[in-house]
Every structure is written in structure tokens, then in C-alpha cells.
């Protein structure tokens, strides 16, 4: 069966807006929290229950945005073991991070997070705009 979500990730990576990307479910009540819906072949996120991914989801779902911001400012966040310094955070919506020129852009939609990695050859603002655009589209589709 074809992966209906794969074209969205292929577009992000193919358009050079991101180096790697994934769409990951966030709703525990649908048994989707941390479930990878699709990802680029070289991202390598386990299909479910990755501790870094679950921690990111918890940060974005934390209703106490100031507490979450304080934790991010002190500790940053991790994805696949790499620690990123928080560069932008709007609780309940998006989290951006950076490490040595590499960006990690994470945007929440109604039922997913879109996570994109951009290496130093890609402008992080371009990556963020593309990921935000995809998240807006998914929100309109109630995803």
C-alpha cells in the first residue's frame, strides 16, 4: 500500500527546503503519540515511542508555555541524541533549534508534528517557512 503522507515529505526534501523530515502523530487518545506517519529514508526515527520525539511532543503540548520555555532555555532539546539550542519557541505551535549551523524545525498541526532537519547549506528561515506552510495545510485538513 502506498504511503499517502510520503509526498509531503518528498516535497520538503525535494524542493531543498529540508535535508530530512518526518510527520509524526501526537494524539495519545488515538494511540498515535510518537507514531511516525512517514519520514525521509535517511532520517531513521524508530516507528514509535522514540524518547526524544515523545519529549518534543510533551514540550509542544505543555499548557504551561512559560515553564516549557524556561526548560528549553536552560536545557535545549534533543532529537536522535543531538542536542539543539532553542532559537524560537511558541508554545503549542512551534519549536526551532540550532546546532553548529544545522537547524531542527518542528511545527505542530492538529494531529501531528512536522519535523525537519536542514543542514548548513539550507537557510533555516526557508526551511521554517516550508514546514509552517505544510502545517497550515494539514490544519486546514484537520490533521
Image: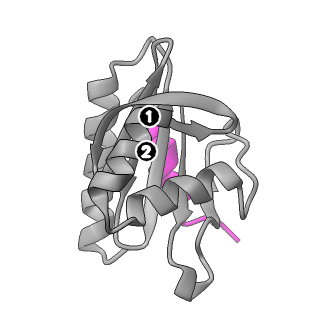
- Crowding at dot 1, Cα within 10 Å, few <14 / some 14-19 / many 20+, comes out as few
* Quadrant (top left, top right, bottom left, bottom right) of the C terminus: bottom left
The residue under label 1 is 74
* Residue 75 locus on image (x, y percent): 50, 35
Residue 130 sits above or below residue 60 on the image: above
Q: Quadrant of residue 123?
A: top left
At 51% from the left edge and 43% from the top edge, which residue is drawn?
10
Q: Horizontal placement of 125 versus 70: left or right?
A: left
65 relative to 88, above or below = below
> Which disc number belongs to residue 71?
2
Please indicate, yes or no, whether residue 93 appears anywhere in the rendered image: no
Pointer 2 local density, CA inside 10 Å: few below 14, some 14–19, many at least 20? some
- Which range is magenta? 1-13
Depicted 85 relative to depicted 65: above or below: above
Q: Quadrant of the N terminus?
A: bottom right
Magenta segment includes 6: yes
Residue name at image x 27 percent, y 61 percent: 137
Amino acid at each position: 500500500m502506498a504511503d499517502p503522507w510520503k509526498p509531503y515529505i518528498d516535497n520538503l526534501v525535494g524542493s531543498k527546503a529540508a535535508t530530512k523530515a518526518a510527520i509524526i502523530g501526537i494524539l495519545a487518545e488515538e494511540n498515535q503519540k510518537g507514531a511516525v506517519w512517514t519520514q525521509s529514508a535517511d532520517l531513521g526515527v524508530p516507528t514509535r515511542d522514540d524518547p526524544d520525539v515523545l519529549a518534543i511532543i510533551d514540550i509542544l503540548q505543555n499548557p504551561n508555555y512559560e515553564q516549557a520555555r524556561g526548560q528549553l532555555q536552560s536545557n535545549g532539546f534533543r532529537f536522535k541524541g543531538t542536542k539543539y539550542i532553542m532559537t524560537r519557541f511558541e508554545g503549542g505551535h512551534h519549536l526551532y533549534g540550532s546546532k553548529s549551523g544545522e537547524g531542527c524545525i518542528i511545527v505542530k498541526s492538529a494531529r501531528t508534528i512536522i519535523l525537519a532537519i536542514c543542514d548548513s547549506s539550507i537557510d533555516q528561515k526557508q526551511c521554517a517557512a516550508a514546514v509552517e506552510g505544510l502545517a497550515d495545510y494539514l490544519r486546514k485538513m484537520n490533521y
